Structure formats: structure tokens, C-alpha cells
Amino acid sequence: MNEEEVQIKRRQNEEDATVRHARIIGLPYLDTRNFERDEGLIRDVLTKEEMHKNFIIPRQVGEGSKPYEFMVTSQTPRSVIESLQKKYDEEGMRVEFYLISNSAYQIYMLRHDPPQEAHYDDIEIASEGDSETIQQVSRTLNSVATDKVFDYLLDQADRLGASDIHIENLRHVIRIRMRVDGILHPVAEINRDRYRIFMGELSSRASVSTASMRPQSGHMQKDITRDGATHLLNIRVETVPTMYGQDAVLRLFNFDESLLNLDLLGITPEERAQIDEVISHPRGLLLMVGPTGSGKSTTLYSIINALNTTERKIITLEDPIEYGLTGISQIPIMTNQGGSFAEGLRSVLRLDPDVVMVGEIRDQDTARTAIQASITGHLVLSSFHANSSSAAFSRMIDMIGVNPVFSSSVRLVIAQRLLRKLDENKEAYKPDVQTVKYIKDVMSNVELTDYNMDDITLWRPKPSQEHPFGYSGRTAIMEQLIVDESIQRFIRGEMMPDTNLIEQTARQGGMLTLQQKGIMAALRGDTTIEEVARVI
């Protein structure tokens, strides 16, 4: 799919989400794509300032039988709509409002009131030892206008597909690094006087203090407009005091609700069937396990989106809320201010939800409450820190003890990792004898009809100007452990809950481990065997 097709799909996804939102708030939806670049704008009904402030555009002046028409977005304050409605009612005129997408609004306003801004060079990721690129980016960042430097950095990180921005105070400079496809890359070293600018922006946007001597958490959002499409960037901010000042890490969540879709995760039909079977039941517990940054939240949100129908009441408890989802009640749990998932869960169960997502099970109280909820008519989804699906049982039993109720509540545990994907410019090679033996040993009990194990071919990255490391994007691999009678015996205490024994039993039942799934990805040419070893 080329860049133009990607933009068309992204815009279509945004329009689809706007249609759903229009139904919820009770406004008619208007698709402007056929005329937004040609239709003139009404300039004497609202000022430019009012259009910018309230995200509203007049489309038609009322006269005779014609009503006044306004195009509004999901960001238009309800009070503005009600005020205009009252104004024209008092004048005896009809007024109609239509919901348009944020991209449509941006296109109209860029034509109507284009910004006069300086243009700066795009940031490039330097390959190892490439000091010239770092110096060039450093010069650019030091030259960006004071009031634009933070927005520029966020926009560039989003363009590169970075998941994190790291702002680090060294003795003489501020180091900027970005995590792209799971790997941290140095981007720039900038003057220390920019520290005040970064922290000043963080303070005002994310509600963190520049003077605090304790770690802090904050949150902010930014609309990113690129190639005629707009998406919302959610940013989770973490700061910590260091010897030379407060370091900050900005975790970026590129919000596109329509892309939170199980069909887009690259899971196999068999894996999808297992998930569908579990979430089709009205009760039970589904756990996602894996380290930070393994994509657990995206998978959980995709499952929530699959369940999101008008017949279900869905509530989430999150710390913090990473994506805002239409039609779902999302509750922030401020654990750093004394809040707890267990207390929040007990409260929301009184609201009679069908599905509850608990951001993370961190303690015994939350675990016990989630288990109780899952056997009393609720489908409960949550994440849990463990290295593998089988290790999740050992950790949970360590936390809550042997609990027969847990064995009847938990139905599926999914362990997940993200592997860097090779781009199309990759190179095939024949592995050495030791690597072939390793692959055959790991895959010895797996039926591999699609691979020739007598003549194994692997792939390695071939760097290019577009992808200097030979990778482009990431792909998820999942280890799905279905809790059947043989696994329940470990949870009930009838057998010692040893991680290796649980995994061995699950493999006999057909489970593929993360290591096996990773090797299969390497055999397909999706990634390298070195990447599998690095991640797993």
C-alpha cells in the first residue's frame, strides 16, 4: 500500500468514526470530501477567531425557506451549538448543524486562513556512528522558534512512528532520543538553555511541576495534521529528577480508533477463533501478559472495540486513559493520588456492566475482585506482568494463593511481544549449522507443512536510504493458552504450579510458545532470527 492509499484509508477510517459519533450525539453526519476543496466559505456569519476557537464553520446563510447551516466537529462545545440555536430561534430563523470530521475542518480552515509558518527540515534517525546527522538535527532543533520547538518535536516523532521521546539532561547538553520500532535512537544534542523551554511546555500542557523533586506523571493531547488527514496524538508524560535537572519520557499513542481492530493485528485465523470463542461468553477472565511496550493495551482495546455494541455496557478502569473510545465509559484511576483498581472495580460493578476492562492487576485485592466479578456475570479483561502465559499462573498463585474460584474464572491468557519487521528490501541467506539445529530443536513438536525444514532459508536486513536499519514497523506475536481441565488442575493445587510443567501441558494441548511463534515469523521472512532472540 503506497502513501496515497494509506492516507485515503486513514481518512476513510476517520469518516467512519465520525459517522458513529454523529449517531451517538444525535447530529446528522456530512461527508465533505466531494466538495471541501472547491466549496467557498461564508465569511460574514462568524469571525475567523470564532471558527478557530469553537471548531465551527458556517456553510449557508438563512433566508426565506433556507435555514442557516453550520458544520461542527466533535471538539465544538455544546454550549456554542445551543447558543446559536437560541439566537436564530429568537430571530424566527431555522438553523441546522452537521457533524464533519476533524480532517474536513482542517482542510476548510487551511484554505480559509492558511498559517504563515517557517518550515524546518525533517528529523532523520542516525545510523550507528553517524555523528553528522545528529549534528544536523541538533542545529535544526536549536533554530526552531521558541514557541514551536515542542510542537515540532512531537510532530517529527509522530512522522517517524516513534513510541517514546526521551529528553535527558547531561552535564553540558540536553540529549534527545526517540524509540522507533522498539529501539532507542539518538536524535540530537541541544543547548541546555532549551531545557527551560521543554520543561515550561511540559508544565503547562501536562500539569507537571518544574520544581518537583519527586517523579511525576502527566497527560496531554495534540492534533497532528498530515497530508490532509488529522489524527489525535495522546501523550503520557513521566518525569524524574536527576543530577542535572528533570528528565522526561513522553510516550506517544497515535489515536486512530478505527485501527483498533483485531483484523489488523496480524493474528492467525486459529488465534482469532480462540479469542472470539472466549469473548462470546457473558462471563470469564481474559488476561494479557507481557512487559511494558509489548502492545498489550492495543490488543485489549481492539478486543473492547470488537465487543462495543449498543447491547453491551462496557466500562474501563485505566491509569492513565491511553485511548478515548466512542460509546465506552472510561474511568481514570489515579493510583499516584491514592486511587486503586480494586476500589474502582467494586464501584463500577454496581453499574451493572456487561464487560469491564481493568488496566492492570497489580495487587492481591484487585486480583481477587476481578476474579469475583468474572464469575458473577461479567466478562473481565485485564493485563498482568509476566514473561509468558504459563508464568502468569505461577505469579498469580504467588499473589492470591491456590484459589479454586480462579480456576473456573480464567479462560484465556495471551502473552504478547512486538518484533521489528523487515522491509521489502531484505536479503536471503542460508544459516549456519548451529542455527539450523537451534531452529529444529525448538520446532521439533510443531507440524510445519508450509516450511522446508531440510533446506532452511532465513532473512537479514538490507539497509536503504528510506530505512537505514532495514526494518519498517513492528508485528505482534502471541502465545495463547486456553485454560482447559488439564491447566485447571495446576490452579486448583492438584499439581505443583510449576511454570515449565504448565507450559509443557499447554504445548501438548497444541499451544505454540512465543519462541516458536517468533521462529515461524523468521522463517516467513517477516523478521530476523536475531530480532527473535533480542525480544524473547
Image: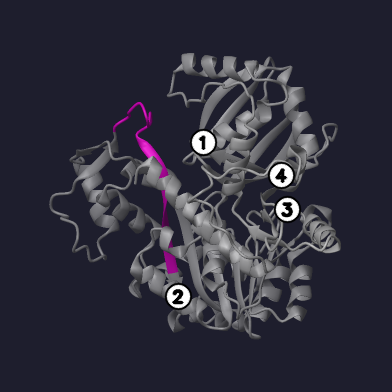
Q: Where is residue 134 in the image (x, y as percent from the top left)?
A: 52, 18
Mark 3 to mark 4 CA distance (whole Å) = 19 Å
Question: Of marks 2 and 3, which one's residue comes earlier in the chain?
Answer: 3
Q: Which amino acid does label 3 sit on?
A: Thr
Viewer-closest of 182 and 534: 182
Q: Which amino acid does label 4 sit on?
A: Met
Q: Name the residue under label 4.
A: 220
Q: Are marks 1 and 4 in contact (CB under 8 Å)?
A: no
Question: Of marks 1 and 3, which one's residue comes earlier in the chain?
Answer: 3
For residue 276, the mark is 2
Within 10 Å of disc 4 (Cα), the crowding (few <14, some 14-19, many 20+) is: some
Q: Which amino acid does label 2 sit on?
A: Asp
User: What range is drawn magenta here?
Assistant: 462-480
For residue 159, the mark is 1
Q: Is mark 1 on a helix, strand or loop?
A: helix
Residue 322 in view of the camera: yes
Q: Name the residue under label 3.
A: 76
Question: Of marks 2 and 4, which one's residue comes earlier in the chain?
Answer: 4
> How many marks overall?
4
Within 10 Å of disc 1 (Cα), the crowding (few <14, some 14-19, many 20+) is: few
Q: Are marks 1 and 3 in contact (CB under 8 Å)?
A: no
Q: In this view, does 177 lie above or below 191?
A: below
Would you identify the image quadrant in which residue 452 lies?
A: bottom left
